[in-house]
Image: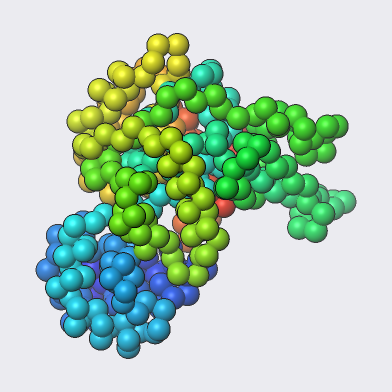
Amino acid sequence: MRSDTGELYRAFAEREAHGNSPIYQELAERVAEDGQLGALLDGLPAVKRQPNLLFAAVRHLGGPVTEGWPAFRDWTTEQWAGVSATMLERRTQTNEAGRCATLLPLLAALPQPLALIEVGASAGLCLYPDRYRYRYRFPAREEGGREREAGAPVAEFGAVVSPVTLDCAVSGPVPFPGRPDSPGFPGSLREWLPEVVWRAGIDLDPLDVRAEEDMRWLESLVWPEQTHRLERLRGAVRVARAEPPLLVRGDLNATVREVVAQAPAGATPVVFHSAVLAYLPPEEREEFAATVRRLPGHWISNEAVSVLPAVARRLPRPAPSGSGLFVLALDERPVAFTGPHGQSLDWFDEA
């Protein structure tokens, strides 16, 4: 299938699924070469042909995602009416709380307290960075500067009681209060959590943490091998259900100003997003950037390298080829490369 859709699935297999999900890598590679399934996908609007959306829809409907390509292909083509209806109704709304581990150093460094406004919030699980625990793994170094894994220092801190602990491998001069080899570390981190006094999210189709069907859709979006992410999702849902966030239905460009205007006086507004702007056409990304530049407070972006040209131009070094890493930036100033699900944080020396 040599088409735009086929190239979309090849790119997904190579850049996203490779090294993360052998199941999805194989399925995406086979979909890319399958003329019949490609024709069915081409019958959908371009924004609804995403690999994640197809695979999640099949899983949501009980289809055979883990049983191999022949079973997947036969079931999906036979059940296409239901699969396509689900893809048209739903969105790729992966709500990965793990990204809070990469956002935290910036959130903790801003003037407190904070009013958090997440665009593309899904169910709002990233609005609770103060309710999670964190486990940061630092590289240990041998004589000569070489890194080794055994004996690497670990800092664990955060909410005293939380069903969620976020693991993140860090490198570079992350601005922690104290370094792994300093006296008293990680005790110096115990109070290093942002003070969040208000939290709100914007989404075209917000998901309700109290609605079982919405949460089942979120679980369908977790890749099949990544059981740790599924456990983390369920823990984050329990956190959010204890105090459901304010979620506003609307287009981010049309809504972000009015939501920021609701932030309480005395709190620093922080507009943030992760893996959201890639779903917008370039002109809408530019419109959003122009809008946020004029808003009070700060703007934290965590997106693929090419998504925000103003950030990409200021990178101190290119991302490793084929890594799929995101760029974390504060007010369009890049500070680190991050793992797409919050699994790594590589802080720039220049930051």
Instruction: Using the image, determine if residue 60 lies above or below residue 153.
Output: below
- Estimate the x, y position of residue 204 in percent, counting from the top left: 23, 43
Q: Residue at x 24, y 45 (%)?
A: 205
**Residue 8 in view of the camera:** no
Extreme residue toward the bottom, this view:
70
Say whether residue 198 is left or right of residue 344. Answer: left
* Color theme of the render: rainbow
Extreme residue toward the left, this view:
43
Q: Quadrant of the N terminus?
A: bottom left
Query: Disc count in the image?
Result: 0
Instruction: Using the image, determine if residue 273 lies above or below residue 93.
Output: above
Q: Residue at x 36, y 19 (%)?
A: 263
Of 110 and 91, nearer the camera is: 91
Q: Residue at x 33, y 70 (%)?
A: 59
- Estimate the x, y position of residue 62 in percent, counting from the top left: 32, 74
Say whether residue 248 is left or right of residue 227. Answer: left
- Estimate the x, y position of residue 183 in percent, counting from the top left: 85, 32
Choose top left, top right, bottom left or bottom right for residue 296.
top left
Of 298 and 265, nearer the camera is: 265
